[in-house]
Each structure stands twice: as structure tokens, then as C-alpha cells.
Amino acid sequence: MGFPIIRPRRLRRTSALRNLICETRLNRSDLIYPIFIDERVQKPIPIESMPEYFRLPIRYVIKEVRQVIDLNIKALILFGIPSKKDEIGSQAFTTDGVIQRTVRVLKREFGDRIVIITDVCLCEYTNHGHCGVLKEGEVDNDSTLEILQKVAVSQAQAGADIVAPSAMMDGQVKAIREALDDSGFIHTGIMAYSAKYASSFYGPFREAAESKPEFGNRKSYQMGYENSNEALREVELDISEGADIVIIKPALPYLDLIHRVKEKFKVPVAAYNVSGEYAMVKAAAQKGWIDEKSAILEILTSIKRAGANLIITYFAKDAGQWLD
């Protein structure tokens, strides 16, 4: 008689058994739903490179958020497309800007039933498409910090629960934390885009937000995909400057970073499952090459398994309909 076979398959035999020993459980409360608000449009505008996604006028956002709440998704992140752009992105910090007006509308309608996160960046608002103020053809870090402070304070005044600086300027978290505190917004959180890579997976977002750079690229301020220790340094700096949550962006090519950051710093980690990752799945599903539901849930679960506490994802509503 030979040695007995060790049989891990015993616990995979039925759905109930597999569920009993499941190590990673994806929940609706893990998800953050991005919304694009375009103050120039009167009806939802389809985003060609992001199937089933739209740029919305402000008056449609309440209906969209009500659907999100009904799915028991707890948080949104808002991106604005203004009617006017200029050199410094001044519409990003005006009191009646597209995001500021949207936040006020949502707070009046829903109060604290949903967490409202606002993107703090200039690429959607500048006529050159870069994330900061230009001097002699280059993004000037310290001049940009002053603008980002104004943006964050204006969003907090409108009622944002959390501001999310994504410009990847040195010192942006410290500058924004000081500006918020000096303006009396000590309870407004900061979700920092701490490790934001200069990625090829952002293309559909740039169509959605009309934020493609008019010249050059963003490699002088976003990170190179070859580096991981540099990402840990960026995360450490943001935490020391006052970040409450840190973001790794994109998600799928950087699962190793999500894991390393979570293990090293023990702080809330958000992963951004970006537009290119979304578009590839949707396109393949439309061709019948993959099972859409299975692929989406596998992707989101893998991001959580890597260590993400929160996942910013365009799949949020899809997943919200499927999760128990």
C-alpha cells in the first residue's frame, strides 16, 4: 500500500465548500466609483474608448449617484470638465466650478450617505493639458503647489469629504494639508496619489476628461514603471506630510507595489483600476473572447488580495450588481 494522497481538492468540491474557505472577499464597500461631470453638455455623452461610460451634465449626477447608493457602494471620486480652460487651470478653484457645484448638489441631496472624493489636479482645466503651471515650457513645481492649495480648499468649502491630489508635485500633500488646516478644514481627508506611474493605460481617461497634454508627456513628474523602491519613498513622504490614504495607480501592472506598500506602512491603501484596464476587458467581452463577469470579479479580487483596502474602478456598478 502506497502513501496516502494529500487531497486539497476536498475543499474545492462544491460551491459551498469553496465559499467556506475563501480567503479574500470582495465587498461593495471596497469600491469607489468615478464620475465625469462636463458642464458644457445637456445630456450624457458616451465615451467611445470606455464602453458604457458617459460624461454627465450636473443635473444627471443625482440620478447616477442614487443608483450607486442603491447598489450599496459607499464612495465616489469626481472629475470635472470645465467650459473654459486657461494657462493655470483657474476653473479648478473657482467657487462656481463644475466640481464645486456638483459637490454642493450631492451634499444637499445625500448628506453623509455617500463619501465624496474630489480629484485635485489641473490637467482637465489647463489649455495645455499638463498637471501644473508652466514656466519656460516645463511644469513648475512650487507655483503649482499654490494652485493646488486653492483647488483643495475650494472643494472642501463645497463639502468634499476627501480631496485627492493627483498632480505628483513634490510637497503637494504637505501644502494641501496646511492650506486645509489654515482654512478650518481639519476634518477633510487627503487621499494622495502617492505612486502614480507614467502609464500607457491612461489613454481612455484622457479622452473622457479631455486632458491629453498638448505637447510632450508627463514623465518628468509621474513615475517610471521600472522603479518600485522609488514608489515606497514617495508613499513614505506623503504619509509623513499628512496623507490619510495612499493610492497606487494603475493597479494591475503594480500589484507588487500594492502588496509592498500595505506590508510596509500599514495604512489604508487604494488602488486605481484605470481606464485602459477597463477598456481592454470591455472590448474583449464585446468580442466574446472572455466572460465579462468572471474577468471583472477576478481582477477586482486580485487587487484586494494584493493588499488594497479600496479600489477605484469603473467596474464598480457592474460589480455592485453581482456581489452578494
Image (spheres, rainbow, N blue to C red):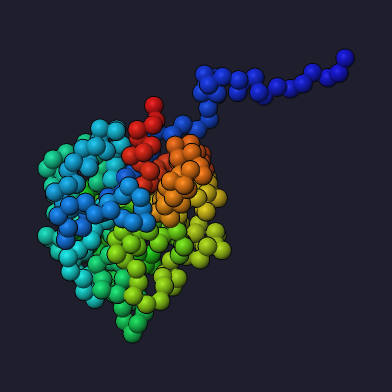
Q: In this view, does 237 lie above or below 261?
A: below
Depth check: 184 or 49 in front? Answer: 49
Tell whether 288 sits left or right of 44: right
Residue 243 seen anywhere in this rendered image of the structure: no
Number of numbered discs present?
A: 0
| Residue 72 vs residue 23, the one in the foreground | 72
Whole-percent x and y of residue 317? 33, 39
Q: Is residue 256 left or right of residue 6?
A: left
The reply, left or right, for residue 42 in relation to residue 233 is: left
**Residue 314: x %, y % from top left:** 36, 47
Residue 153 or 2: which is nearer the viewer?
2
Please tell me whether residue 230 is drawn above or below residue 287 in the rendered image. below
Name the one closer to the observer, 323 or 249. 323
Image coordinates of residue 165 in percent, x first then y, are 32, 59
Task: Name which quarter of the figure residue 210 lies in.
Answer: bottom left
Q: Which residue is drawn at 24% across and 64% down?
A: 149
| Residue at the (38%, 43%) spot, across then down | 315
Q: Residue furthest right?
A: 1
Residue name at image x 53 percent, y 27 percent: 22
In the rendered image, the quadrant that contains the C terminus is top left
Position of residue 238 relative to residue 104, above or below, is: below
- In this orientation, does residue 160 appear? yes
Where residue 65 appears, as percent x and y from the top left, is: 22, 41
Residue extending farthest to the top is 1
Q: Is residue 139 left or right of residue 94?
A: right
Quarter of the figure that contains the N terminus: top right
Q: Quadrant of residue 318?
A: top left
